[in-house]
Image (spheres, grey):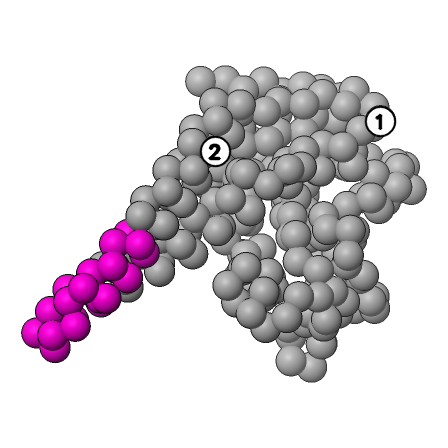
Amino acid sequence: MKIVTNQKKIDRNLKLSKYTLYISLAMLALGFIWSIRNTQPENSLIGWLILIPSYFLVQISIYLSNKWGRSPRPDEIVTQSLKGLKDEYTLYNFSTSIDHVLVGPSGIWIINPYHQRGEITYNDKKGKYHQKGGPSFIGKYFGQEALPSVHRDVKNLKNDLATFLQGKSITTETEPAVVNLFIGEEVEIKGKDFPYLTLKSNKFKEYLRKHADKNILSADQIEKINKKITSK
């Protein structure tokens, strides 16, 4: 498998995650110190004006740290999980409008990674993905480990990639497929009624190999798509 990774973007966002964390912690400390030293009601508003923005900065720093500061990063886990695929496949990390795209004989794949823990199921009647177990409520809320709206994420990713492909004049008979890839070790996928392919990260390569006979893109098509993706 060939790998194209935008290392500059990774380094830039890693620095951003660190700076955001430092600024948010400094603002929290400033807010607490101000609140302690200025107990008069007329001065309490200033303390809140410092603490409230710092809280949101903390949430942003957690998100950035999970994505860019955690080791191994999501892109490293995705890359490792697909290691060993034939060179007909090319994995693009942060090189298109979405984070992870795989191009190969089985078509164009949108890889949507989640680091959430616990048991993942799908309720067909409610049309929702569910997360059972994993971290406590505090961990899910403050650690941002609660499962977001998968349908919304997939819709946004498909729209973003469609716009990118259109801008590169890339067309295929079959639209890009989606795989929701759960990259954590402490996660279990239960059930078979998922609306999109939903797998643990160590199962995706096996899935592609099992369906190797369903070639959607020819070698010429793959070469043209790769050239257009990397063109400036």
Magenta segment includes 30:
yes
C-alpha separation, residue under disc 2 versus residue under disc 1? 28 Å
- As helix, strand or loop, the secondary structure at mark 1 comes to loop
Position above or below: 108 against 58: above
Magenta segment includes 57:
no
Q: In which quadrant of the rendered image does the N terminus lie?
A: top right
Number of disc labels: 2
x and y, in percent, of residue 4 in the image: 62, 22
Crowd band around label 2 with a 10 angstrom C-alpha radius: few (<14), some (14–19), many (20+): some
Q: Range of the magenta residues?
A: 27-49
Residue 17 horizontal side relative to residue 105, left or right: left
Position above or below: 68 against 226: below
Which residue position is annotated with label 1? 84
x and y, in percent, of residue 225 in the image: 61, 25
x and y, in percent, of residue 195 in the image: 71, 64
Q: Residue at x 8, y 74 (%)?
A: 42
Which residue position is annotated with label 2? 14
Q: Identity of the amino acid at label 1?
A: Gly
In-front residue for pair 83/138: 138
Position above or below: 157 against 32: above
Q: Which residue is drawn at 11% across and 74% down?
A: 40
